[in-house]
Image (cartoon, coloured by chain):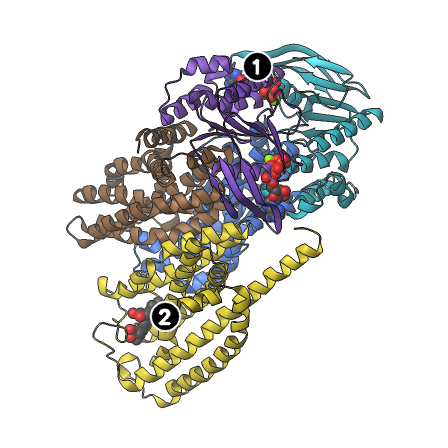
Chain colours: A purple, B cyan, C yellow, D blue, E brown
Amino acid sequence: MQGHGLGAVRGERILFSGLNFTLGAGELVALRGVNGAGKTTLLRQLAGLSQPQAGRVDRAGRHHWISHNNGLKAHETPRRHLMHWARVWGSSAGIDEVLTMLRLKRPADVPCSLLSAGQKRRTALGRLLLEVRPVWLLDEPFNALDAEGQAWLGTLMTDHCARGGAIVAALHAAAPITPVREFTL
Amino acid sequence: MQGHGLGAVRGERILFSGLNFTLGAGELVALRGVNGAGKTTLLRQLAGLSQPQAGRVDRAGRHHWISHNNGLKAHETPRRHLMHWARVWGSSAGIDEVLTMLRLKRPADVPCSLLSAGQKRRTALGRLLLEVRPVWLLDEPFNALDAEGQAWLGTLMTDHCARGGAIVAALHAAAPITPVREFTL
Amino acid sequence: MGHMWSVLANPHRFLGFSRYAVPSAYSLGLILFAWSLYQALWRVPPDEFQGGDIMRGMFVHVPSAWLCMGLYLGLAVASFVWFIWRHELADVAARAIAPVGAAYTALCLATGSVWGKATWGTWWLWDDPRIMSVLVLFFLFLGYMALRAALETRQSAARAGAILAMIGAVNVPLIKFSVDIWASLHQGPSVIRAEGPALAAVYLHPLLIGFLGQGLLVSAMVLTLMRAEIFSQQADRLMARRLGGG
Amino acid sequence: MRAAPIRRSFVQAVMEAWSGGAGLLLPVGFFSGTAMLVPFALGSAPDVLSDIGPGMLWLALALASLVTLERVFQADLHDGALDLWVQEPAAISLVALTKTLAHWSVSGLPLVLLTPLYGLMFQVPPETTLPAMAAFGLGGLTFFLWGGVAAALSASVARGGLLIALLALPLYLPTLIFGGLTVKTGFEDSAFLFLLASTLFALGVAPPAMGAALRLAAD
Amino acid sequence: MRAAPIRRSFVQAVMEAWSGGAGLLLPVGFFSGTAMLVPFALGSAPDVLSDIGPGMLWLALALASLVTLERVFQADLHDGALDLWVQEPAAISLVALTKTLAHWSVSGLPLVLLTPLYGLMFQVPPETTLPAMAAFGLGGLTFFLWGGVAAALSASVARGGLLIALLALPLYLPTLIFGGLTVKTGFEDSAFLFLLASTLFALGVAPPAMGAALRLAAD
Ligand code: HEM
Ligand SMILES: Nc1ncnc2c1ncn2[C@@H]1O[C@H](COP(=O)(O)OP(=O)(O)OP(=O)(O)O)[C@@H](O)[C@H]1O
Ligand SMILES: Nc1ncnc2c1ncn2[C@@H]1O[C@H](COP(=O)(O)OP(=O)(O)OP(=O)(O)O)[C@@H](O)[C@H]1O
Ligand SMILES: [Mg+2]
Ligand SMILES: [Mg+2]
């Protein structure tokens, strides 16, 4: 995945311009910057959600997207949510195993609107396990997870990169991963 | 602030029961527990937002409440939000100084729906500076803040306790504060 | 033509061009409009079949009807140009056209309604396709303005407005052909039609010249609003730079 | 009790209503649009029209109260502003009442001011204009109050739209009846008194109901 | 293109519609409630009633499409589900079309099935039942499509309710005219063909417009 000369303007403010970004196989890039620097904006441009005001993004292969809004519908249960996207993507992953890994066996059938913050986040992270995709775009993925969950996600991310995947993650605090590269906005 | 024999039932599950909780002046209590343990539930009961299924809460004095939902209206700017609550509470705090402390001078007049996650959180935290209240109830307050913001909030919390205030904060990861007591659910 | 567009797409060139175009269009338009009004009010013989003296209202009604349709087409075309090529000036134009278009549509409805009271005996007919389709046009203009005003940033306002404006464009042929498709009290076309105008020259010439005059006035108004918009954008930018943003 | 929280909740709600949609243009366009739609649905013989003219405006008012309030309390719930209000010492029912009044003043009141104009359009006799304005004012207020109760009750429901409409419709009925009669018979008749009574009743009952429903939604 | 995404977006939307509000009970109650309200607003002389009966149902259908779709796209935007759909290779316009169809089938279709019953209530001649059902079916579908465009356009607006109504009303008009005529004149007349044409037009134009509007909302 590559971004060439990316630019973003918000209101009268230029967040970034002429930004070149390359992500190679096996790389884990930590996106850093103060609040409001433009990390989320850049990630949304890389994901194709937001039209860059300048430059272009070349994508090779599909990506997974995890952001603050977990993408859960209020009426869905974790099981239904994962089943839904598994079907959409034609994945044959076993939902029960995924739920076990996420430690969501207990609240598997509770509607998402009643779940705790960490359980919602875990459900969203479950999408990463449904289908193997080369690129993961993660916006502050460790938020709301407990210590065990953070360690688990750290291992998951490291493993993904070891298998040749690539990750861009916006991060603030210390996280249980060692990024290959820091990219500061 | 004291909770006597608090109990919470969600669906078929007992989150906690017969829980006694005391918060003395100058104490900083870290609420710990795995995802879904009931930290948010307990905080909402302490705040009076949620009716305990058993037991009762005795409150002395008012408290500040910061949770995942920052409480910002989409159309409000940070300046308007802080002005609004300052007026409601009859506070005479200088909004401009508060905005400077929060590092929100620049986006002070941008509608909240356009702010970055950290900027929204900073705006909500600004309410803590509007009025001196003995108790602060904070649900994962460090989320979404950058390193500088986390350090700032840590100092703010420590100072508050040093001045005789009390804080209950649900926390997951390491935070730049040293809690007097850990309370694990 | 293509050259002219690329020249005008640049805001500075546009400001330079419109600086002279606006006053000229205002003055020429006023002269032509005044002449046609003079002809209409004092020179043209009244046509008893069209309700006597009241038919002099034609010289306002018909140009305003053509202009409000034309303005909507302008809005749709500007929206299309912006949507495809992102020429900022096209968006400025679309934004400027909307209020003028709404005003002219209201004028068309009001003059038609006054005329209708004299000839059809009623101010308003709820099931007349011509009246209704013009009313829909009015609400499209209003909806366009309301939508733009409701969105937070200029970019998203422009995009959402463009989508609405392009969909609404189907209403224009609907207005034009409404009298042919349904039974309507409104008369059929007598000027813009396949067989050529069927109007006597005494009426036709002042009408066409009046239309030209009002058209120039409308263009001048739109250009004025566009200039104001461009200036306010420049002022915003300057202000931001002063305040140390950007 | 201090007045500041109530005043501020009014200001906040007016700004919310105003900012979201082009100020007054929106309700004016909306009322005119609905008034335009109804003759098509119901036929437009001129005598029918002057008969059903006020009826159209009642329907537009009912619709406006439903679609406006639907979002208000749901948004408060989702963005966490409801949590903050519930924790205020100012009674949540008063705050809810104030919010409802604010939204009514932006989205319902314009109809009252436009009544003379619509009266002309629908060829309603001019002496009924004043009673009609009073009826639309009081009736609209009552619609917004009951609509607020319905919206607060279903704030936490995913597909609240139809539910709100269903809950509110029976509550609207008495107002609609007496309001419709007032437009026809003017102030002399007892209908106006009944309308007034139904508004006062709503003013008394709706705020605590809204308050309770909102507390429930926050829980 | 694979069919699974489209099928799943249908299922998800039906479940969303169904779960939020008591299943079919809700639209049935809603249509009955509105039908009940209108005679009060417009008077209930028997001849008037059989005249305006279908009109009421048109209004109820318009209202249902507005209040239902208002929440749909806004919720998608706020919970982040829209982000996920926009990134699918399946065209977002197809997904939006499917969602709209799903919500129509839960909240609009019941009216079609209830038409014979309402026909009895309003003493409409029985031979018009079939045309009426066709008209309510096609007309309702068109309402939902245009309502979807309006809702998608104002998904990111705080006070969208009135705005959606204002945007949708002019788009509803042709359908309302031809639909109303079809109920009166049956299949023979050209009105039915025009109704069909307006539905087909909406089916062609509304999905790309919804798609573009949703991409915009996600941006
Ligand atoms: C509110 C009511 C009315 C509306 C909305 C209305 C609208 C329009 C529109 C949109 C046109 C342009 C049509 C075209 O170019 O084909 C037009 C043209 C015209 N209208 Fe009206 N009209 C109204 C009432 C009347 C009345 C009462 C009369 C007189 C009996 C009238 C006489 C004309 C004439 C003579 C033309 C020119 C048609 C031509 O020569 O092509 N209109 N009107
Ligand atoms: N209309 C606008 N006018 C001015 N600034 C704007 C406007 N819209 C957005 N912004 C700014 O654009 C930036 C968006 O930043 P973004 O969300 O990408 O930040 P981020 O790096 O993800 O921050 P965080 O660490 O807080 O998540 C913010 O600083 C915001 O204030
Ligand atoms: N209807 C229900 N049936 C079963 N369980 C429920 C129901 N409603 C809520 N729950 C459970 O209640 C718990 C609420 O926990 P709470 O939000 O207080 O957790 P928390 O400690 O704040 O977790 P986190 O660290 O993830 O924020 C969750 O485990 C949730 O699954
Ligand atoms: Mg961010
Ligand atoms: Mg929690």
Residue at 45 percent of width and 80 percent of height: C29
Q: Which of C201 and D111 is in front in this view?
A: C201
- Which residue in the structure is indicated by mark 2? C65
Mark 2: C-beta under 8 Å from nearest atom of ligand 1: yes
Q: Residues within 10 Å of mark 2 (few under 14, many from 20)?
A: many
The relative height of residue D121 versus residue C63 in the rendered view (above or below) is above
Image coordinates of residue E45 in percent, x first then y, are: 30, 49
The chain identifier of the residue carrying mark 1 reads B
Based on the displayed image, in which of its 4 quarters is residue A140 positioned?
Answer: top right
Residue at 43 percent of width and 68 percent of height: C3
Question: Residue D188: in sight, yes or no?
Answer: no
Ligand 3's quadrant is top right
Question: Residue C219: in sight, yes or no?
Answer: yes
Residue at 36 percent of width and 70 percent of height: C65
- Which residue in the structure is indicated by mark 1? B9
Based on the displayed image, in which of its 4 quarters is residue E12 positioned?
Answer: top left
Q: Is residue E195 left or right of residue E82?
A: left
Q: Which of marks 2 and 1 is in front?
A: 2
The relative height of residue C93 versus residue A110 in the rendered view (above or below) is below
The kind of secondary structure element at disc 1 is: strand
Q: Do the residues labelled 2 and 1 touch (CB within 8 Å)?
A: no
Q: Which circle marks residue B40 in the picture?
A: none
The residue most toward the top is: B18
Image coordinates of residue E131 in percent, x first then y, are: 20, 44
The kind of secondary structure element at disc 2 is: helix
Q: Which of C11 and D75 is in front in this view?
A: C11
Q: In this view, does E89 lie to the left or right of B65?
A: left
Label 2 in the same subunit as label 1: no
Q: How far apart are marks 2 and 1 (CA)?
A: 68 Å
The disc labelled 1 sits on which kind of residue? Val
The disc labelled 2 sits on which kind of residue? Ala
The chain identifier of the residue carrying mark 2 reads C
